[in-house]
Amino acid sequence: MLVLGIETSCDETGIALYHTERGLLSHALYSQMEMHSEYGGVVPELASRDHIRRVLPLIRKTLATANLALTDVTAIAYTQGPGLAGALLVGASIAEAIGHALKIPVIGIHHLEGHLLSPLLSTPSPNFPFVALLVSGGHTQLMEVSGVGRYRLLGETVDDAAGEAFDKTAKLLGLGYPGGPALSELADEFLKSGKPRNFKLPRPMLRSGDLNFSFSGLKTAVLTLTNKHGITQQTRGDIALAFQEAIVEVLTEKSLTALTQTGLTQLVVAGGVGANRQLRTSLSHRSASIGATVFYPELQFCTDNGAMIAFAGAMRFRKSVANSYHQTGSFTVRARWDLELLDTP
Ligand code: KG4
Ligand code: ZN
């Protein structure tokens, strides 16, 4: 089976071709980041319009790279939600149109399921069951994953997502949008420089006794620091490091608690913040200390991409659970969509 994957949930157009026997054949991505950075955040209407411009050329490019024709595609998977409604509609309508023309099955995929399963695209890959730490711009969740579609929520953020906290803090430090990667680089540079640290930020909900997170207070704590000390080259790196260390420690310790509570020994990290170097080092180090293994998607599959959607589609088609939440011939997108309720009617 050759699955064409289409991702248009936010500000990245991602297209991929995944073959159930031959693996990932090709993928292409267009990031709208530069266009949105001018406005300091994603502008939904601009995002939708740009997806319209990019989807078909990217599909052609992906097919050409794999030396295949559209008629070779045997199924289509697209991101049905959660995300920006207008952006999702672009992927959904193109997927449905192609599916209708070729008379092939089409499936709507939950964006977070794509992220959750993305480490299975890499080798070595984890086996079910595992604990997944999902850390993206919109979500921060710990999940117990027992199989495709079998997800149990262990804990989640009560306010900002980890990526959102990175981006908002980066904005406060004047690092542009989305500032997560820039903030992380600055923090790493400061750490490498060996300069003495002047700041320490709180570890929100570290001892809350559950697996929930809260990150909005960190941003406020950073604001208090910048108001007091001003933003200079010195304080910027210093604060970036303090912020990164606080968030990394909370994510690491809660992930470890999730492993011990479930008795599982595999941790999968997915979503954009999974690209963070300090988080990776900390998780790998601490997990090894309790005999657990951490699995990461390849860096290019940490942030939004079409490969994870094509792959999740292939998994669902293979498990014959494909159409449990999708009716062929009509489609709806789901701007909000609870992952735990995925396979309930
Ligand atoms: O998964 P993703 O591409 O999109 C969503 O579905 O949200 O995640 C994007 C988020 C952004 O908030 C971005 O700042 C953050 O991931 N991010 C990072 C890093 N790379 C991306 N945050 C911290 N460190 C990084 N290296
Ligand atoms: Zn995402």
Image (spheres, grey):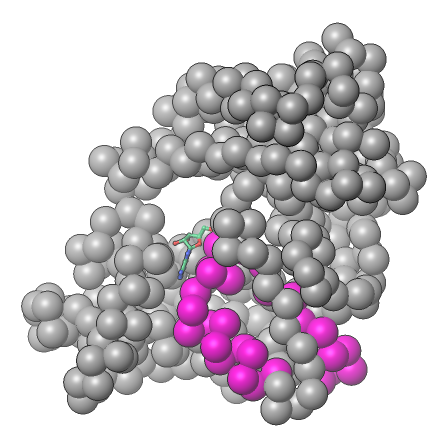
Asked if residue 79 lies left or right of residue 138, the reply is right
Q: Quadrant of residue 220?
A: bottom left
Q: Quadrant of the C terminus?
A: top right
Asked if residue 324 lies left or right of residue 15, the reply is right
Q: Residue 286 magenta-drawn?
A: yes
- Rendered location of residue 170, percent (x, y): 27, 58
- Rendered location of residue 300, percent (x, y): 51, 50
Q: Residue 129 magenta-drawn?
A: no
Q: Which residue shows up at 91% across the image and 39% down it?
A: 320
Q: Magenta residues, as a range?
A: 260-287
Q: Nearer the viewer, residue 89 or 311?
A: 311
Is residue 236 placed above or below 327 in the rendered structure? Answer: below
Is residue 219 placed above or below 342 in the rendered structure? Answer: below
Is residue 20 visible in this depiction of the protein?
yes
Residue at the bottom extreme of this rendering: 289
- The majority secondary structure of the magenta stretch comes to helix
Q: Nearer the viewer, residue 148 or 218?
A: 148
Is residue 240 visible in this depiction of the protein?
no
Q: Which residue shows up at 56% across the image and 56% down it?
A: 298
Asked if residue 46 lies left or right of residue 190, the reply is right
Q: Which residue shows up at 64% across the image and 44% down it?
A: 308
- Rendered location of residue 330, percent (x, y): 76, 17
- Rendered location of residue 7, percent (x, y): 58, 34
